[in-house]
Amino acid sequence: MNKHIRQIALVVLSIVHAPINATDMDSSFSVKWQTTPWGSGGLYPAGPPWGMVGPFDFDSDGYGDFVVSSSYTGSFCNDIYHYEAVSDDSVALKWLYTFSELSCTDDNYSSIAVGDLDSDSNPEILALMDTDPGVSGQHGLQIFEWDPDSLAFPNTPTTTWDMGLDSIWEAGQILTAELDGDETEEVIVSIMDGPWGTTGSCRLMIFELENNDLESPVWNIEYEDPVTTNWSGYNISVGDLDLDGLMEIYTIAYEYYHLIVYENMGSHDTYAYQTDFYVSLELYERGNQSIIVANLDQDTTNELYAVTSGTNTLDGALLTPGYFYVVQGTNDVSQLTFENFNFFNDYPGGLRQINIGDADGDGNPNLYLAGHYNEALYDWEYLGGDPLSPENYIEHTIFMDDTTDNFTPGNDQGRVRVAKVFAGDIDNDGEGDLVFTSASFAPDKPQLYMIEYSDELSSDDKDKIIPDKVTLGQNYPNPFNPNTQFSYHLPESGMIKLAVYDILGKEVYEFFSGYQHTGNHNVLWTGVDNYGGPVPSGVYYYKLIAGSKTMTKKLVLTK
């Protein structure tokens, strides 16, 4: 069987909700693993882990992998780390690369992505790094391809590229996605290639590997737009908000939540600017995470969801909270304005990311919010019905740091600054996990955490969210590329079969056939058939047979 990437795509959903104080602690989650605090060697000498992507299964062993990138300040050089779960509640560092060849003299940033640019089923880590102006030989794009023989990433980059730029003043964001229908992944980057305040200093670039050869790469820059704004974009998302079959690219500049929208024009390598505007209720409000397009209830309209990080002074004083917005689908993204943004909720400590999963395995999608200076992780569980109705959700705080802060000026107030999060059973023990980062220099705080669901909800909450019948959840994301996930619930043990079929009813991929115990189960499909080969784009059906019950749902693979 060919090795293939297993990644739960970061698809995010949200809801219109009256303001809520997220103080209801959910005891069903507990910390199972964390790194050594930064001051005791955790991620040292690197700075805080601003970037994280996952989960994956690079070696197809059933244990989840994820990749972290650190940023550096002063003498702390950027690193990238590959972690893998190795047993129940245990995660180990498998690979590390330090960018010592790049300058470590200034405050700098990094971003990472995972893709398969050469379509050989061996994934690559793509690292976007800052470089110094006027220093020859420094390449901001560094790529490391998985070696299926050694089951590891290489000790040196597989290839590097300067992207035709003299320097990268700030490496804002990197993302891989198939945008134009040619079945070759594009790389999307948002960078700053000049000093702050310089006209056209920030730019969006879209490019792909033209010859499918990372040893002698030929790069094709499909689109480039110098953007007149301060600071680069700290978030890139793709989606189809107007449901016209054409992928949009959304990037957010750190300059007071400056949202900029582009769209593929229906042919290979062709894109066009659509609109840009500021999403801001407050002076100095900034937003660097996160925005996404999704369809929670699988109806005929998509929604766009957005959060802002808010701002704080160095001593922790609140300037502006983080805001949560929702936008209903539109017929034309070029007409999108701030007037379309509906205020959802605010969080005094700000928000850094939103992500979706089903860590409790009950078939209901959960929206996870990274509460930045609140040192918290919030969980919004969708129960079905109208996704814009607040009564269709349960909200809990599933993590809150309650340790004593060792505050010293300049160390982020001693806070666990929750920044990035993903969901998935990475230690393969049947219990859902959430992995998240702390983007903090606080010397007495860990910077990576894994919390796990342990089914200790109150009886009232269980009555609300635990089904007493066979259920089959809708996959998310849908449409998807390259991976999707869904959950199902068995109220009693018995014989089951779960498989994917094409539109003619031919079995494509079998997940399981046999006796299975009662409970909640999570499933990930990477778009392959029973022989490990990739399946073509199109409509598929997944079917669960449990006793006398048969349930079927549709999913769509796009390439």
Image (cartoon, grey):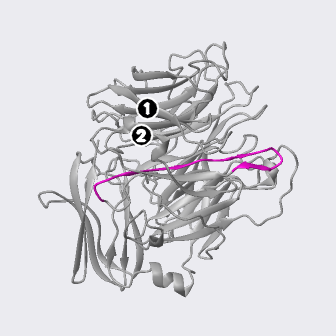
Magenta-tinted stretch: 299-320
In the shown orientation, is residue 439 left or right of residue 382?
right
- Residue at figure coordinates x 51%, y 16% from the top left: 164
Quarter where residue 382 is shown: bottom left
The residue sitting at the left extreme is 504
Query: Does any portion of residue 280 appear in the rendered image?
Result: yes
Mark 1 element type:
strand
Which residue is tagged 1?
275
Q: Picture coordinates of residue 515 (x, y %)?
A: 32, 80
Quarter where residue 270 is shown: top left
The residue sitting at the right extreme is 408
Which comes before the other along the chain, label 1 or label 2? 1
Between 493 and 354, which is closer to the camera in this rendering?
354
Tell me: residue 85, above or below residue 410: below
Label 1 – label 2 distance at C-alpha: 7 Å
Tell me: residue 268, above or below residue 308: above
Which residue is tagged 2?
336
Amino acid found under the numbered disc labelled 2:
Leu
Between 467 and 112, which is closer to the camera in this rendering?
467
| Crowd around label 1: few <14 · some 14–19 · many ≥20 (10 Å) | some
- Residue at figure coordinates x 41%, y 64% from the top left: 387
Magenta stretch encompasses residue 260? no
Amino acid found under the numbered disc labelled 1:
Thr
The quadrant of the image that shows the C terminus is top left
